[in-house]
Image (spheres, rainbow, N blue to C red):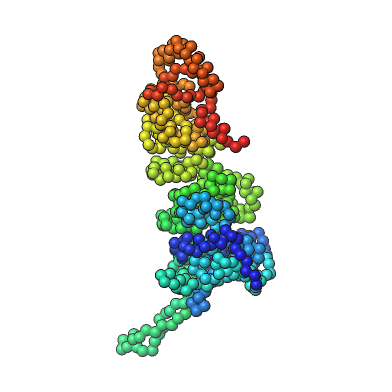
Amino acid sequence: MAVKQFKAESKRLLDLMINSIYTHKEIFLRELISNASDAIDKLYFRSLTDDSVALKKKDFEIRLSPDKDKRTLVISDNGIGMTKEELEQNLGTIAKSGSLDFKQNNEANNKVDIIGQFGVGFYSAFMVASKVTVISRAFGTQEAWKWESKGAEGYTLTPCEKATAGTDIILVIKENEGDEHYDEYLDDWRLAEIVKKYSDYIRYPIKMLRTKSRMVEGTDKDADGNYKTPEYENYTEDETLNSMVPIWKRDKKKVSDEEYAEFYKQKFTDWSDPAKVIQSKTEGTATYNALLFIPSRAPFNYYTKEYEKGLQLYASGVLIMDRCADLLPDHFSFVKGLVDSQDLSLNISREMLQHDSQLKLIKTTLERKIKNELSAWLKNDREKYEEFFKNFGLQLKMGCYTGYGANKDQLQDLLLFHSGKENKYVTLREYVDAMPEEQKYIYYAAGESCEKLAKLPAAERVLSKGFDILYLTDDVDEFVLQMLREYDKKEFRNISGDDLGLESESEKEELKAQNEENKDLFAAMKEALGDKVSEVRLSQRLVSHPVCLSSSGPLSIEMEKVLNNMPT
Ligand code: ADP
Ligand code: MG
């Protein structure tokens, strides 16, 4: 039988993975259980509209069967199953090539961060297993297929028998080797512990037949009628290991930060803990539970077209959509999480959902909630907010810009800019509050870096007046300010522009007179410089520098540069 090779990238990624990408080997169980749960979700959802699914909610289960003698651990589910093609597609290729390109181009990136971005959970089985066999029968088909692999060298795919739809994953657990212990993954007590730790909230029962022992009546009694030597007998009991209460339905005071973090990492494939957890329960016009997360770093594809925003959508605890884009505005597209509402109909279609007024209502309240949480964060934990802003601030700024000002009120107070006065970030509010009374405008300068901007002659002049300058270093910054136009009735002024409003009326008069006096000199200079400048004149913008370039018209020199660099 021919052994099929994994796709080239898969092979390398698999090597990487097995060589301890995950520091805790035990998480393989979490990954396999979560796949089983997803598969059941799919079939359960289908059962709501398809009578040929004879299973009811109570019939669905995930089962763990360890066998110490054979050194096997089987994880079974009666979910949707996989066809031959799906086995090949889902388990034959690990990640899209993009991930590896990314890694190659970013050697400095910690490898774990990349892995975390991808759904490669299944392969974690190879951390503890020397051989993995997947026997699967897709719902609605009669045939079953066996996928088998010993790791990086490849896999085989052969037809086999299976009585019902679903999947069995059979792991041959590795032998102990030096410091590495694998026996524990055959131990029912240890398995129960791992399930409790990582998979407690899974909404289907995770069952395991457990061997327990109980005291039985002996025969040997003492004078008082008590048994002298207690006797025990072993018996087996089918036990459900998880509590099955979804984490978002639990009282948030009773859920630890670790539990939220675990849930987030597992559900939304991230390696790092979330930077912020937002839990909200709303009753009234829109009744729903939402559990939202702000990642602690931007996914590597975040600022590309590949990134898809969206929240998981549940209707009364049943997953109906994995990525519902309609729940999030673009400027908050970095938010991950889920919404569970009892007001949504279960067999609602994607098209109907778009027009669902309930959904619109949820979106509006969520948006407000996120905004308020970000504002509170900015106020109460500045350091972490600044960290967040480094990751996702660009998205907020683009929201200001692309919304043509529509999101202005929501977003302008969430923005941070570099201050020219001190090496720190300021909000527009802070800038305006710190303005001396005689300052009329909000000054800004746009360029590559704060260091370069600080050297501008015009910056020296403005700062010397005791006025702060917003140093704009992102391409989009200046467009944002143009879109906002003003803040708290104070206009934005580029320090390389014409009128900085720094001079008094008499100073302006004096300048005009001096320009007039030296008219011939300037004309000669203009002639010498030719097309390179449109005008030469005296300026009061300078303190210690002899000359500076200044732009006229609506676009600054920097904006012109950005526009010239834009692909057409
Ligand atoms: P992810 O779960 O993030 O998609 P995995 O590597 O864990 O990535 O799984 C890859 C794919 O294999 C899944 O998306 C799913 O389509 C399929 N799969 C894995 N386990 C099962 C299962 N028990 N039943 C049905 N499909 C499964
Ligand atoms: Mg998975």
- At horizontal 59% and vertical 66% (from top left) the residue drawn is 154
Q: Which sits in the foreground, 313 or 475?
A: 475
- Residue 183 in the image: state x and y as whole percent: 45, 73
- At horizontal 55% and vertical 21% (from top left) the residue drawn is 531
- Does the image show residue 380? yes
Q: Which sits in the foreground, 499 or 166?
A: 499
- Residue 477 in the image: state x and y as whole percent: 49, 35
Picture quadrant where residue 317 is located: bottom right
Up-down: is 449 above or below 144?
above
- At horizontal 36% and vertical 25% (from top left) the residue drawn is 464
- Does the image show residue 373? no
Q: How many marks?
A: 0
- At horizontal 54% and vertical 20% (from top left) the residue drawn is 530
Left or right: residue 309 compared with residue 387: right
Q: Which sits in the foreground, 76 or 18?
A: 18
Residue reaching furthest left? Answer: 223
